[in-house]
Structures are given as structure tokens and as C-alpha cells.
Image (cartoon, rainbow, N blue to C red):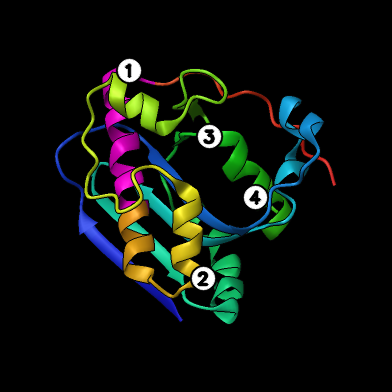
Amino acid sequence: MIIEHKEITPSGSFKGTIIDIETIGEFTRNRSYTAFNDSRQCENLQQVIFGLINDKELQIFCAQDREAIEELKSQTEQILNRLERPFYAFNTNFESSVWFHHIGITINFDGELQEFKFESKAAAKMSLDIPNYDDPFYDVGRLCMEAWHSKEFDKAIAHNRACLLKERDILLKREYREPDKVNFNK
């Protein structure tokens, strides 16, 4: 089963869609993959939450078990096809790489919300004076993965919701940059 959370977007208008996903699994330990934006750094990750925010709504899809992961996997491309571009993410390489390996689709983002490669969301939030938005994990994504495994879906959804609102604020306060090119490799 997939839990769907939907709400009207609080203030802040922008064109396009911000996307944030949560995953389970392990990053590949080959450091050269990270250094060269190689998609294989995410080949062992599976999407369990797909969140999006635009100027109308905030929507989150959360898989509750392995069967639902497959259901979310099959719905992801359909969800993406109905969204308005441009697409933004805090770490575009991550979302693109997960989707390439887990779902088999190649998506190029239009805007990168990280000011520089490896900037943490916590640092961006602090420098731009952005609230925590009730994030139970205070920008520590690994804790979201642990919550999902513990079936604490309400906390995992709250984290993704907070990430989307923080990323919206980042876009509104400092705009975006051109995404780094992802090297899609099998």
C-alpha cells in the first residue's frame, strides 16, 4: 500500500516542481563514482518516498512495504509526466541516479538547489535562516531510512514534507544553479 499525503502549498510562488525522494539501501563505496557524478553511486538504492511541491500543492507518496516499493516504482514515470517543468532538486545527481538504476528512466533536472556540490541542506537552511518545518530528523536523511524500516511512516513523511518546504525556501531565497552533468552508467 502507498500512503498519499497532500496539502495546499503554503505561501511562495515559483514556476515548476521541486522533487525530493527518500531511499533505502547503501551507497556504493567506490569514491570515484561520487567524484565523477557517476550514477553507479546509487545503484543499490531504492526509492521509498516520492515528494513534490509546486505553487499549488505539496504531495508525498510513501511505500509501506516491498510490494508497495514496486508499485511506487511503476507509478513514478506517470507522476513525473504530469508535473510542470522546470524540475528542481537539492541534489539532482541523487534523484537522477536513483531513478536511472531503480526505475530505469533518465531524467535531467533543470535546476540544482545546492549552491555547490556536497553542500548540506542543514548548512543551506542555516545560512538562509530557513525554519526546520517540524523535521523530526533535522536534515539527517539516514534517520528517515531507519524510520521507514521501523514502519514509522508518519516520521518519514514529516521529514520529506520538511525537506520539500526547505527546498522551496532555498529556491525562493537564492534561486538555483545549472545542475552538474550526471554520468549515467550501468
Residue 174, percent across and down?
32, 17
Task: Please tell me which of labels 2 and 3 falls first in the chain.
Answer: 3
Q: Which residues are magenta?
A: 160-175
- 35 in magenta: no
Q: Marks 1 and 3, Cα distance to the nearest angstrom?
A: 15 Å
- 171 in magenta: yes
Q: Main secondary structure of the magenta part?
A: helix
Residue pointed to by mark 3: 91
Q: Marks 1 and 4, Cα distance to the nearest angstrom?
A: 26 Å
Question: What kind of residue is marked 2?
Answer: His
Camera-side residue of 27 and 178 = 27
- Cβ atoms at labels 1 and 3 below 8 Å apart: no
Asked whether the viewer can see residue 107, the reply is: no
Residue 185, percent across and down?
83, 41
Q: Residue at x 75, y 51 (%)?
A: 43
The mark found on residue 174 in the picture is: 1
Q: Marks 1 and 2, Cα distance to the nearest angstrom?
A: 35 Å
The mark found on residue 149 in the picture is: 2
Task: Please tell me which of labels 3 and 4 falls first in the chain.
Answer: 3
- Cβ atoms at labels 1 and 4 below 8 Å apart: no
